[in-house]
Image (spheres, grey):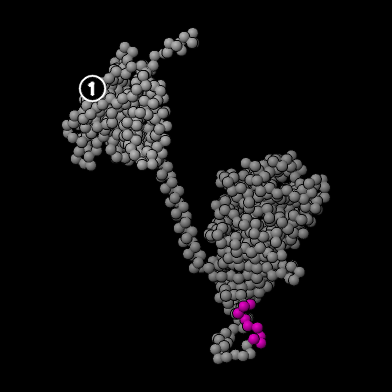
Amino acid sequence: MCRTDQSVPEPGEEQDVDATDAVFTALLEDSAEELYEQAPCGYLSTLMDGTIAKINATLLEWLGLERSQVVGRMRFTDLLTVGGKLYHETHFAPLLQMKGEVSGIALDIKTAGKQRMPVLVTSKVKTSEEGEPMLIRTTVFDARDRRAYEMELLRGRQAAEEARRQSEADRARLQEALAVLQQSLLPAELPVVPGLEAGSYYHTASPDLLGGDFYDLFPLGGGQWAFFLGDVCGKGPQAAAVTSLARYTLRAAALHDPDPVSVLTTLNTVLHERYASGEGRYCTAIFGVLQPADGRVRLHLASGGHPSALIQRADGSADYLPTPGGLLVGVLPQAPFTAARTDLLPGDTLLLYTDGLTEARTGPERELYGDDALRAFTAAQPPAGPQSLITALSGLLASFGDGLDDDTALLALGVPSLPSIASEDLTT
Amino acid sequence: MDTRRRNNVTVTGCPDGPVLLLAHGFGCDQNMWRLVVPTLAESYRLVLFDYVGSGRANPSAWDERRYSSLDGYARDVLEVVEELDLREVTFVGHSVSAMVGVLAAAKAPERISRLVMVAPSPRYIDDEGYRGGFSAEDIDELLESLESNYLGWSAAMAPVIMGNADRPELGQELTASFCATDPDMARVFARTTFLSDSREDLKTVVVPTLILECRQDVIAPREVGAYVRDTIPGSQLVTLEATGHCPQLSAPQATAAAIVDFVGAAS
C-alpha cells in the first residue's frame, strides 16, 4: 500500500529486538523514502493549482518521464488523456474542492509511447492548521486488468440492455399480432337484426393465449339469421387455427344448407378430415337458425357435444333446451347431432355459453358452479333482454375471480318485449 | 409539474436586491456556487437551480429529446424565471450554461438584462479558423470516461466521497447528489454540451455581458475567452488568477468580486 504512516516504526521503538524482529528488520530495509519511491502505486503531490511538486519513481516509470520534466513544469491534468482532462475538470476537481477528498475515480494517463493506461485515482487535500488548503496528495493505481474486466461487464450490460429492448419490442409486436388474430376469431360487433336483440361477452383467461371459444351471428337471407357458439379443445395458436377453420366452415356450410344438423355434419367432416391423421382436434358447438314470424321467432338449433342452451322466458322462468346425445364435432368420421326447436316469444332470451361459465370454481370448496346454479341465477334476473342478461352474467364471471380459469364466451339473443300498455297510457 | 420542485430551485440572499440567477454547468449541480453564495448573498437576491438531469432536480421530468439541445436547458431557465416572475435578471452561467444564458436572453430580453459568463466556450471542437481546444475523438474519450466512472456509480461512489470534517454543511445530503448523475442523463448532457456550436448565437447578445476566464483552463482556453469577447459587442473580459475550469471554487473571492463589480450593488 502507498500510505506509509502506519508501516514505518517510530524511532526508539525497536530497542528490545529479538531474533524474529531482526529477520523482519533485515527484510524491511526500506526507508520511508524507499517505500514512497518504489511503492506499488503512483504517488504525487500537487499545489492547489495542480502544479506537480513531488512524484514517485513508480509513476515516472509508467509515464516514461524524467523527474526534471515533471516537477514544477507539469500539472496533474497534463498527465491525463484529453477525455480524462475533461472528466477531471467537470467532476473530479469540483468534488475535490468541495469535499477535500475524492476516491477511486477511473481516469487514463498517457504513458511512454503514447499508450493509455487506465488508472484509479484518489486525491486528498492537505490543509494547514488554520484549515487553509495547501496541497493535494494523489495516489494512482494501475487499473489495466480491472478496467478490462469492467469493460467486459459494461459491454455485457449494454448487450443485455439491448437484448431486453429488443425482446420488449418483439413482445409488443407479438401481442399486437395476437390481438388482431384473436379479433378475427370473433365478430368485431354483432350485426343489428330486425326484431331481435343480441348481446355477447368474451372473457379471455390469459391475454397471451389465443382463445378457443368462438361465436357469430349472420344473415342467411330471406329474413333468416344464423348463429353459433362453440369451444375448441385446448388453447393457444393450434386451438386458434381450429377456431378459425370452424368459424368459416360453419358460415360457408350455413349458406349452402342452413339445416343445423347438416351444418354441424359438414363441420364434422371438415375437422375430421383435417385433423384425424394428426393430433386430433375437435370442438363442441351449437348452431341454430332464427326465423322471425308473427311476432315470435322460430328457433331451430343443433348441438354437437355442447352444453344445452338456456332460455329465460318473459315470465321470469329459465329452462334448458335439451339437446342430448350430440357428439363432439370432428372426432368420428360420422357423428349424430341432436336438434331441438322452440319459439321465442316477446321477452324471451336464448343464452348460449361455453363451459368456462359452468365449470368455474366457486366458494371455499372450489366446487363447480354447475348447470343448476346457472339456471337459478338466470331465473333470478328480471327478464329485461339480452343486454341486461349479459351484463348480469359478466358481473357473475367477474365475481368468480381466479376461480374462472378458462376462456368464456356468452351469446344472448332475444325478442324485444311488447311495449307495456300501462306505460303507454302514462306517456300519452 | 411545479417548476420550483422540478428544478430544485433555491432562493436566498436579499429579498429586495437585484436578482442573480446562478446556473451550473455540465458535471455537477447548484452546489458549484456554494463558495461564492455567502458574498453575493450580501447584496443580491440569489436564485439557484439544478437542470433536469442534474443534482436534485426531479428525474421524472427527464425528456431525452428536450435535453439533447441547449434550447431544452434554456427552457428550464425561462420556466424558472417565469415561475418566480423574475425581472432585471443577471444570468450567471458557468461553462456550457453561459451559452444556455445566451439562448434564454434572446428569448426573454424583458427578463434577462445582463449576462455573466464563467469560463464559457461557444464550441469545444476545433473548426476551420477556430480553435476550441478539442477534437471529435477527444469528446468520444470523455464519453468513455463517463461510462467507466458510472459503473457502480450509485453503489460505490457516494459512500467513498468523504464529507469534509470542518465543513459539516457539505455532509451526507450533499454527498448523495453532488456530481452524482444518472449515467444516461449525464451522457446526453455531455454530448449536448461538447458537441454544440453556439458561435452564431453569440452574435445575438445585446445585453451587457461580463466574461470571466481563468488564467489556465483546459476546457475553455484563453483564446476562446478572447473569441467570445470579440464576438459579443461591448462585452468585458476579466481574467481571473485561477486555474482549472471552476473559478467559483478555486478562486471564489475573486469570482464574486468581479460579479459585484459588474452588476453593482443595486440597480
Residue type at mark 1? Answer: Asp
**Is residue A323 shown above or below B113?**
above
Which residue is outermost to the front? A365
Q: Residue at x 36, y 42 (%)?
A: A365
| Residue A210 appears anywhere in the view | no
Relative depth, front residue between A307 and A163: A307
Counting from the top left corner in percent of width and height, residue A234 is at: 29, 40
Counting from the top left corner in percent of width and height, residue B260 is at: 79, 53
Magenta stretch in the rendered image: A5-13
Q: Residue at x 23, y 33 (%)?
A: A328
- Give the residue number, with chain letter if any, for mark 1: A259
Please tell me whether the stretch drawn in magenta is mainly helix, strand or loop. Answer: loop
In the rendered image, the quadrant that contains the N terminus of chain A is bottom right
Relative depth, front residue between A49 and B211: A49
Q: Judging from the image, what secondary structure is the residue with disc 1 in?
A: loop
Which residue is outermost to the left? A334
Q: Is residue A199 left or right of residue A61?
A: left
Counting from the top left corner in percent of width and height, residue B17 is at: 80, 47
Q: Is residue B84 magenta?
A: no
Query: How many residues crowd around disc 1 within 10 Å: few (fewer than 14), some, or many (20 or more)?
Result: many
Q: Is residue B9 left or right of residue A342?
A: right
Relative depth, front residue between A278 and A128: A278
Q: Is residue A388 left or right of residue B250?
A: left
Q: Chain of mark 1?
A: A
Counting from the top left corner in percent of width and height, residue B3 is at: 65, 43
Q: Residue at x 65, y 65 (%)?
A: A101
